[in-house]
């Protein structure tokens, strides 16, 4: 049962880590790559 | 020569289990045709069930069509991956890229996967031993909460769960039932004041370069941290890259239409073909369907609760309802959020925010599937 609890905790930690990094990446992309005039 | 009529007359081999499965197949075809419930999926699945359960039909026997398709498309994980190329080509990540914060709602809503996994394991080998659920079976059952058919097929087949057919059918069935499952939970967890909160419909435009870099960067980030998710996220983002680069419109159109349609037909028939009476009609199947609805409920609740946290932290600028769209049932849950927002306040258009959370949920559910594939073998 403890194993399953570890999987839950680590699983959610992995999700938030990966998506947190994607969030940071998106913020940077939006900051540095502004739409061109045509866009 | 000793020949029995039952050796070549199918109807002499009927029993209550086969008749039940034929009725289930007929019901799915009826729901798809007459009620327009997920017809693209339910008609092939329903037909697959009918064909697989015709006694002496041989469709699921060694060398039969369904046996070949199962080996070629499910056991190799080919079909879900090809479907993901099509899905990636269909998804517009624009609303999500314009509102990056929605990615956190997609992450939170994946709690349904892990909460359900924990519950299934407690009912099985983890504690109560009511059911014959191993750690791998529990993980496969939990993945129903990804609200995503291809991810459910992929994870349950990689983990080698014996309940793969029930898991996949539960995932697809509940995706169709999202408009019924989600609203009561959303209402229960939010106040009228929260549901009425208006959010701006306009957002900062995103450059085309961002839309092109995003799928490539996502493959790299997800692949390096959760490598087991690489096949799924790779195919999803490859499809999206075809859509966004703007120089391979023919490939993008093929991925969205011909490829997705062909694989949907094959996948639907194969999933239906996995629902053989003797294997499918077990007490475990019924329990998997009950646990499956809990997975969707937990997803919704976790998304809305995280939405409430963001509502408070943002100074009451984020409507918590959009958290419900963090599950990846695309685009049904975004529509549910939009509808409920409008019911409370006719000027409250939440669709684009919910669509952002919805596409974030698509990515998050793939990462969750990869995390499950990473972690379960470590603890098995």
Image: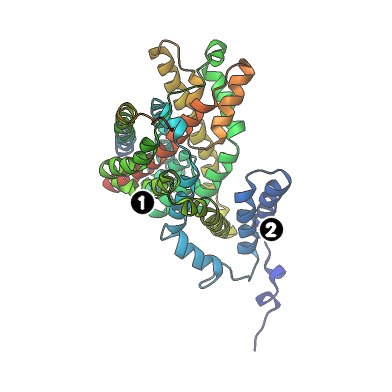
Residue A26 vertical placement versus B237 (above, below): above
x%, y% of residue B302?
A: 44, 26
Give the mark nearest the N terminus, 2 or 1.
Answer: 2
Q: Which mark is residue B19?
A: 2
Q: Outermost residue, front direction?
A: A37
Q: Which residue is drawn at the image coordinates 68% and 64% (left, top)?
A: B14
Q: Outermost residue, bottom direction?
A: B1
x%, y% of residue A25?
A: 30, 32
x%, y% of residue B81?
A: 43, 53
Which image quadrant: the N terminus of chain B? Answer: bottom right
Provide the secondary structure element on which disc 2 rests. helix
x%, y% of residue B40?
A: 61, 50
Q: Which residue is drawn at the image coordinates 52% and 19% (left, top)?
A: B189
Q: In the figure, is residue B257 to the left or right of B113?
A: right
Nearer to me, B115 or B123: B115
Residue, disc 1: B231
Crowd around label 2: few <14 · some 14–19 · many ≥20 (10 Å): some
Chain designation of label 1: B
Q: Which mark is residue B140?
A: none
């Amino acid at each position: 049962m403890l194993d399953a609890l570890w999987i839950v905790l680590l699983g959610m930690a992995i999700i938030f880590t990966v998506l947190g990094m994607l969030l940071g990446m998106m913020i940077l992309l939006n900051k540095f790559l502004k739409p061109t005039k045509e866009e | 020569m000793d020949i029995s009529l039952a050796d070549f007359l199918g109807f002499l081999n009927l029993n209550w289990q086969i008749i039940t499965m034929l009725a289930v197949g007929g019901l799915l075809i009826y729901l798809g045709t007459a009620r327009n419930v997920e017809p693209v999926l339910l008609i092939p699945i329903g037909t697959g069930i009918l064909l697989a359960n015709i006694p002496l039909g041989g469709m699921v026997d060694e060398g039969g069509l369904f046996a070949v398709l199962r080996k070629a498309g499910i056991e190799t994980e080919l079909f879900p991956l090809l479907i993901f190329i099509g899905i990636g080509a269909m998804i517009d990540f624009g609303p999500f890229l314009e509102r990056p914060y929605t990615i956190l709602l997609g992450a939170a809503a994946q709690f349904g996967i892990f909460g359900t996994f924990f519950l299934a394991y407690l009912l099985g080998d983890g504690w109560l031993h009511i059911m014959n659920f191993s750690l791998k079976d529990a993980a496969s059952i939990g993945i129903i909460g990804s609200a995503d058919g291809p991810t459910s097929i992929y994870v349950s087949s990689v983990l080698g769960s014996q309940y793969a057919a029930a898991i996949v059918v539960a995932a697809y069935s509940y995706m169709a039932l999202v408009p019924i499952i989600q609203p009561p939970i959303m209402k229960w967890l939010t106040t009228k004041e929260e549901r009425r909160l208006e959010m701006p419909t306009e957002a900062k435009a995103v450059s085309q370069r961002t839309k092109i870099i995003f799928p490539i960067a996502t493959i790299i980030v997800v692949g390096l941290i959760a490598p087991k998710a690489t096949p799924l996220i790779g195919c999803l983002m490859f499809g999206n890259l075809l859509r966004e680069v703007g120089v391979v419109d023919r490939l993008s159109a093929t991925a969205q239409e011909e490829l997705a349609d062909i694989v949907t037909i094959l996948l639907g028939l194969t999933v239906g073909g996995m629902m053989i009476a003797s294997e499918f009609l077990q007490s475990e199947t019924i329990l998997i369907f009950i646990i499956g609805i809990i997975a969707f409920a937990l997803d919704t609740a976790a998304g809305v609760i995280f939405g409430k946290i963001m509502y408070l932290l943002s100074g009451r600028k984020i409507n918590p309802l959009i958290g419900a769209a963090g599950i990846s049932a695309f685009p049904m849950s975004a529509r549910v959020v939009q509808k409920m927002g409008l019911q409370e306040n006719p000027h409250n258009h939440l669709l684009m925010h919910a669509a952002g959370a919805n596409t974030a949920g698509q990515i998050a559910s793939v990462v969750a599937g990869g995390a499950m594939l990473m972690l379960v073998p470590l603890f098995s």
